[in-house]
Amino acid sequence: MAQTNQRIDDKRLWDTLMGFAEIGATPKGGVRRLTLTGVDRLGRDKFQAECEAIGLTVRVDAIGNMFARRPGRDPDRLPVLFGSHLDSQPSGGKFDGALGVIAGLEVMRSLNDLGIVTEAPLELINWTDEEGSRFGHSLMGSGVWAGVFALDKAYALTDTEGVSVATALDGIGYRGPEPAGPFKADAYFELHIEQGPILEREGKQIGIATGAQAQVWYDAAIFGQDSHAGTTPPSARKDALVCAARIIDLVDRTMRACGEDGRGTVGQLLVLPNSRNVIPGEVRFSVEFRHPSDAEVNRLDAEFPPAAQAIADACGVKLELTELFKIPAQPFDPDCVGLVRQGAARMGYTTRDIVSGAGHDAVYVARHVPTAMIFTPCKDGLSHNEAESIEPEEAAAGCQVLFEAVVARANRRL
Amino acid sequence: MAQTNQRIDDKRLWDTLMGFAEIGATPKGGVRRLTLTGVDRLGRDKFQAECEAIGLTVRVDAIGNMFARRPGRDPDRLPVLFGSHLDSQPSGGKFDGALGVIAGLEVMRSLNDLGIVTEAPLELINWTDEEGSRFGHSLMGSGVWAGVFALDKAYALTDTEGVSVATALDGIGYRGPEPAGPFKADAYFELHIEQGPILEREGKQIGIATGAQAQVWYDAAIFGQDSHAGTTPPSARKDALVCAARIIDLVDRTMRACGEDGRGTVGQLLVLPNSRNVIPGEVRFSVEFRHPSDAEVNRLDAEFPPAAQAIADACGVKLELTELFKIPAQPFDPDCVGLVRQGAARMGYTTRDIVSGAGHDAVYVARHVPTAMIFTPCKDGLSHNEAESIEPEEAAAGCQVLFEAVVARANRRL
C-alpha cells in the first residue's frame, strides 16, 4: 500500500492539546472541567472559536452537542463524523476525551493546509457530558443523540446542588437550536486514549478497536446483624462484611476463570455502622462484569447471582442483588475498522486489535452510524487521574490514523 | 445456703431506670447522653440529688467521677465500691451503663428500707465517659482513676468541635476537687447488661464474669493501583479491595479456628476512590482479635500478620499492618467472683460463667481493687443500639445479686 506525504502537524497538535489543558488545569497537572460549568464553557468557546477560525460552521443541538462542519465537494453525500468530548472527571487528566476532539481539529487544519477538499462533508463533534461526574449519567450527550436516553429525562437530572441539566445548559448558553437526534451520517470515528495498560505493555502504537464489551452491572446489599465485636461468639455472628468479602473474592475468581478478556470489579463499598468494635450489620456494594462476548456475559449473569446467594446462605445473612443493566457487546463496523487498520498499516505503526473496555460516545453512535475507534497508549494505563499522561508522538500517531481513516472514508467511491 | 428475706424493690428499680431514660431520650426509644454535655449534666444532677435524698455524701474527682458514700459501722474499714456509668453512645440504649448505676442506687435505698448498716462503708460510683464516643477515648474516667491514662492527657482530648475535656468538665460544673486516683478500697462490683447473646440463648438469668478477654487491635492499609474497571485485564490488576476481602475472610476463619471463645472482627473499612467503575487502589480497615487466654492472643498476634502479608504478596499489593495495642486478659478476683456466685445461688437464679468481651470500667478498677462483674441478659444480644432492651425481672435479678454480693463483702469477717 502506497504511503502518502499527507501528514498532520505533530507540534501544532501537541501545542493545542496543552492549550486546552490550561482550561481547568489543576495543581497536580490534571484537568477539572466538569460538564456545563463555567470552565466547560471556556473550553467550548475556545473550541468554537478555533473551528470558526479555520472556516468550519458550528451547530449546537438541544443537549449541547457541538458539530463543526467542513463542506465536501459533493453536498449530497452524508457527512463523515469524528470527535469525542471536552468534559473531564473531577480529578481528570489532560487527554481523556480532549485528545479525540483536538486531534479532530488538527485533521481539519491539516486538510486546509494540504488544500484537500474531501468528497463527503466532515463534521467534528464535541459531545456533552461524556463523564457523568456532575449529573450522574455518563454518555449523556451521545445517549440523547442516539435516542438511548430521553431529552426531557436528561434535562431533569440535577447535580448535588440541585442545578438541573436544562438550567446548566442555559446558564452557559449551550442549549442549542438543533434537535438532538440521530441524523444520517456516513461514518463516525473516535480517537481516544486506551485508559488501560495493554498497548503500553505490548509496545503497540495503535489499538484497532473492533467493538465494545458486553456488560452487566449489579447493586448488592447484605443485611446481617450489628453486634458487639467483643461479646458476640462465632456461632451468633451475622457479619455482613464477611459475606461481602467472600462475594468480592467470588467476583475476582469468576473474572479470572474467563481469562484475560474478562473483567469483574467491586469498585464501591459501604459498611454500616462502620465502627471498629461493632460487627457490620449492613454492607452495600457494586458489582460489574464485562466481556467481549455476549454469550460469556449471559453465562456470568446466569451463574453469579446463585453463587453469591449460596455464599449469603452459608453466612446466614440476607442478600439483595439488583441488576442495574445489561448491555450487549457493540461490534464496530467492519469497513470503518478496516480503514483504521489500513491507515495504521500505511504509516507503518505497530498495532493490536482491542475491545473497548470503557464506555465511549462511539458505542452509542454505533447504533445508528457505521463506527470505529482508534486507541493510543497511555502511561501505566492510568486514566480518570490527574497523573494521566501520553507522549507527543503517541498523540501524533493516533491523529495521523484518524486523518487517514477520515479522508479515506470521505473520498471512497460510492 | 439459707435464703434471706432481704429483697430489693423491683418496681422502684424499674421506675428509676425509666426515669433516667427520659434524660436524653430519643424518638426510637433509646438514649443519647453523650459524656460531659448538658444532657449528661442533667443525669449527673439527678443522680446526685437522688443520692443525697437518701443520706449519701457525694464527692466528685478531678475527671468528674462521682462517688456516693454510705457510712459503715466500722469507719476504719475500706469501702466496698460498686457502680457503672451514666453516659451513652450517640444512638445508645437505656441500660448500657445506667443499669449498674441505678441498681447501685436501689441497693442503697433497700439498705435504708431494711435498716441495714454494713460493717464497711459503701460507695456507689458513676464513672465519667465510659463510652468514648465524644472524645475518642473509652473508659476515660476509670482509666484516669486507675492511672492507666494521665489526667493531663485526658483534659487535652477534644471533641469534633474542638471542645476539650477540661473545658467540657468546667462547662457542666463537674471538675471536682478530689484527686483522680486509686484510693484504697476493699472490693468493686459492677452490674452490666451482657451486650451479647449468650445468656439469652442459654436461658440464664445471671452471668458470673470471671474476667475480661485479652485483645489485640490493628490498623491495616492496603495500597494497590486505581485503574479502570473496564480496560484493566486481570493480569494487570492491583485491586486493594480483593486483597482486603481475602484478609477479612482470614480474620473470620482464624476466629472460628479458636472455637466459641474466639473473637475476630473487621468493623471499619474505607475504600478509595470508591467509584463504581474504578478498581480500588487503597483500602483501610480495622482488625481485632479477642480471647480469654493470653497465650491464644499471643499466638494470633504471631500468626496473623505473616498470614495477611502472604495474601498481600499473592495479590501483588502492599500491606501496612500497625498494631494499635495488645492488652492482657484481666482475671477478676476469685473471692469477689465467689460472692457473686453465692448471691445468685442463694436466690436460686440460673447462672453461667462468662468472660467479658466488652471493655468495662471494672477491667481498669481490677488493677487496684479486688473486682467482679455481674451480667444480665439483653434482648437479641443487642447493645450500642436504641433497640437495646431488657425485661424488668432481668434487671431485678441483677440488682438483687449486686445487693447480695455487696452486703456479703461489706459484712465479711476480716
Image: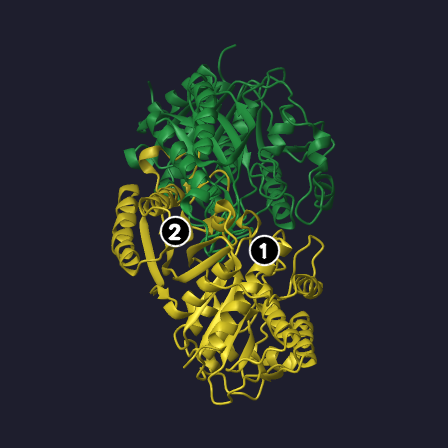
Chain colours: A green, B yellow
Give amino acid for label 1: Glu
Q: Nearer the viewer, residue B361 or A373?
A: B361
User: SS at mark 1?
Assistant: helix
Q: Is residue A68 visible?
A: no
* Number of residues whose C-alpha sits closer than 10 Å to that of mark 1, classed few (under 14), some (14–19) or many (20 or more): some
Which label sits in the foreground, 1 or 2?
A: 1
Q: Is residue B408 visible?
A: yes
* Number of residues whose C-alpha sits closer than 10 Å to that of mark 2, classed few (under 14), some (14–19) or many (20 or more): many
Give amino acid for label 2: Arg
Provide the residue designation for mark 1. Answer: B394
Residue A232: x and y, percent?
A: 45, 50
Q: Are marks 1 and 2 in contact (CB under 8 Å)?
A: no
Q: Earlier in the sequence, mark 1 or mark 2?
A: 2
Q: Residue at x 62, y 57 (%)?
A: B91
Q: Nearer the viewer, residue B118 or A45?
A: B118
Provide the residue designation for mark 2. Answer: B263
Residue A116: x and y, percent?
A: 50, 26
**What is the chain identity of the residue bearing mark 2?**
B
Q: Quadrant of residue B24?
A: bottom right
Q: Nearer the viewer, residue B116 or B271?
A: B116
**What is the chain identity of the residue bearing mark 1?**
B
Residue A84: x and y, percent?
A: 53, 34
Q: In which quadrant is the C terminus of chain B drawn? A: bottom left
Q: How far is mark 1 from mark 2, CA to CA?
A: 26 Å
Q: Residue at x 65, y 44 (%)?
A: A36
Q: Quadrant of residue B400?
A: bottom right
In the image, is A407 to the left or to the right of B238?
right
Task: Farthest residue to the top: give it.
Answer: A414
Residue B332 drawn above or below residue B387 = below
Q: Nearer the viewer, residue A317 or A203?
A: A317
